[in-house]
């Protein structure tokens, strides 16, 4: 492995994180009149001051700047994290029924009060990271409380798995979808993936036996239900009885799952399970090459039953492939994975980074044109995927044998 190439790779990732992604959010996203962060920023950085605000964005901002502060000890990053934490605590937290609200108006009044388990998971993930960043015990208490509420209300104790959404009072609801593009099914891979992510991170800092059991259970759900052991793709949508309801393939989720599953098993600390998940991660990453186009970008989705492809290259699958391929390289020693990760990075630099207005584009359309009609920041467009990819790959480069790359801070 070319040490110089690794060093340049790492240096570019750090420059992107500290010189583009984090400054963009610090400059454009804070809502200095009503608190928290603006709910919508256009491609050209025009802020809609009256856009509704989502818990997912706020939790992802909290995670991002907590992680950045842990890395660099820059007080400006901690101030951003604290802004997000304070707003989640004061406005998104449902003090009457528990959990967190899905959506608020720009003044902080609840608009959508249902309990989306996906949002619960992201808030757990972010609160645990904030506690690691600054030792705020109320943040850890909040993460634990949300874990206990998720287990009490969302876990299907008869058939296993987590239901997608519940009412404010934790009752069943007819429409459980995260977004209009999703199938209206009660058990989804996506929500379970982020429960896996959240429980993994909470277990790092709170070694509770019930959490360990829950994390082990989610890992095994992926092994038994979600990962196809023949194709190495994920099954995405199920009904309550685990009947598969879709043949859709999501390349971004496949590669994201590969490294999150490997990480979860490693944190759980069971050697045999960790080895099994590591082997699966390599298989999933290698199969994921089938989603790469001629420009080395990862396409969005494949619909086998309809013989149809969504060839757009959204920002977040590129970020997850950056990590997932590098993780497979670490696990296998196969340098093809490293070069695939580097290829994704080149595609990101050339096509995804917005060199005019900052941050990353929503994506590149299948015709090769930038998708300038989508937001720069909003319910789903947040700094979590791209900042985490930079931090993860930098850390992994530093962990390689015979590496001597250190921060310049």
Image (tube, grey):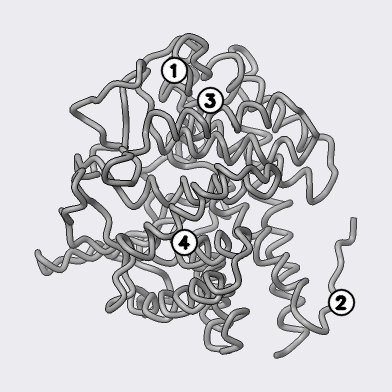
Identify the mark nearer the N-term, 4 or 2.
Answer: 4
Residue linked to disc 1 = 104
Question: Regarding mark 1 in the picture, which secondary structure is present there?
Answer: strand
Residue linked to disc 2 = 404
Q: Nearer the viewer, mark 3 or mark 1?
A: 1
**Gap in Å between the C-alphas at discs 3 and 1?**
11 Å
Q: In the rendered structure, find residue 38 and report the number of the disc placed on it.
A: 3
Q: Is residue 386 above or below residue 31?
A: below
Q: Position of residue 218 (x, y in %)?
A: 43, 53
| Front-most of residues 408 and 163 | 163
| Front-most of residues 363 and 341 | 341
Q: Left or right of 139: which side holds 406?
A: right
Identify the mark nearer the N-term, 3 or 1.
Answer: 3
Q: Left or right of 164: which side holds 70?
A: right
Q: Is residue 112 visible?
A: no
Image quarter where the C terminus lies is: bottom right
**Gap in Å between the C-alphas at discs 1 and 4?**
29 Å
- Tell which residue pokes out farthest to the right in this image: 409
Question: Regarding mark 4 in the picture, which secondary structure is present there?
Answer: helix
**Gap in Å between the C-alphas at discs 2 and 1?**
47 Å
**Gap in Å between the C-alphas at discs 4 and 2?**
28 Å
Q: Position of residue 11 (x, y in %)?
A: 75, 68
Q: Nearer the viewer, mark 1 or mark 4?
A: 4
Q: Residue at x 44, y 17 (%)?
A: 104
Question: Regarding mark 2 in the picture, which secondary structure is present there?
Answer: loop
Residue linked to disc 4 = 256
Tell me whether circle 4 and circle 3 mark residues in contact (CB < 8 Å): no
């Amino acid at each position: 492995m070319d040490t110089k190439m690794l060093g340049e790779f790492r240096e570019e990732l750090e420059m992107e994180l500290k010189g583009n992604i984090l400054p963009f959010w610090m400059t454009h996203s804070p809502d200095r009149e009503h608190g928290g962060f603006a709910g919508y920023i256009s491609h050209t950085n025009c802020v809609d001051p009256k856009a509704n605000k989502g818990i997912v964005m706020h939790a992802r901002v909290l995670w991002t700047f907590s992680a950045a502060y842990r890395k660099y000890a820059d007080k400006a990053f901690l101030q951003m994290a604290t802004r997000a934490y304070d707003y989640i605590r004061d406005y998104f937290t449902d003090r009457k029924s528990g959990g967190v609200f899905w959506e608020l108006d720009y003044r902080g009044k609840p608009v959508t009060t249902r309990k989306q388990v996906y949002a619960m998971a992201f808030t757990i993930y972010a609160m645990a990271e904030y506690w690691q960043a600054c030792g705020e015990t109320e943040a850890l208490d909040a993460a634990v409380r949300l874990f206990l509420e998720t287990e009490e209300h969302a876990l299907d104790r008869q058939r296993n798995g987590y239901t997608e959404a519940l009412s404010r009072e934790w009752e069943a609801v007819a429409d459980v979808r995260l977004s209009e593009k999703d199938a209206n099914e009660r058990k989804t891979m996506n929500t379970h993936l982020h429960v896996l992510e959240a429980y993994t991170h909470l277990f790092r800092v709170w070694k509770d036996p019930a959490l360990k059991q829950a994390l082990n259970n989610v890992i095994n759900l992926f092994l038994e239900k979600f990962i196809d052991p023949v194709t190495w793709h994920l099954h995405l949508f199920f009904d309550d009885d685990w009947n598969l309801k879709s043949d859709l393939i999501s390349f971004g989720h496949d590669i994201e799952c590969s490294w999150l599953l490997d990480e979860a098993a490693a944190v759980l600390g069971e050697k045999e399970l960790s080895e099994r998940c590591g082997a699966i991660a390599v298989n999933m990453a290698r199969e994921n090459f089938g989603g790469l186009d001629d420009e080395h970008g990862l396409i969005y989705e494949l619909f086998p039953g309809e013989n149809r492809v969504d060839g757009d290259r959204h920002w977040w699958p590129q970020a997850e492939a950056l990590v997932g391929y590098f993780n497979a390289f670490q696990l296998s020693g196969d340098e093809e994975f490293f070069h695939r990760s580097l290829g994704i990075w080149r595609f990101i630099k050339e096509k995804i980074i917005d060199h005019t207005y900052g941050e990353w584009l929503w994506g590149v359309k299948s015709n090769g044109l930038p998708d300038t009609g989508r937001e720069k920041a909003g319910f789903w467009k947040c700094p979590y995927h791209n900042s985490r990819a930079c931090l993860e790959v930098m850390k992994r480069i530093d962990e390689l044998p015979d590496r001597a790359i250190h921060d310049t801070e």
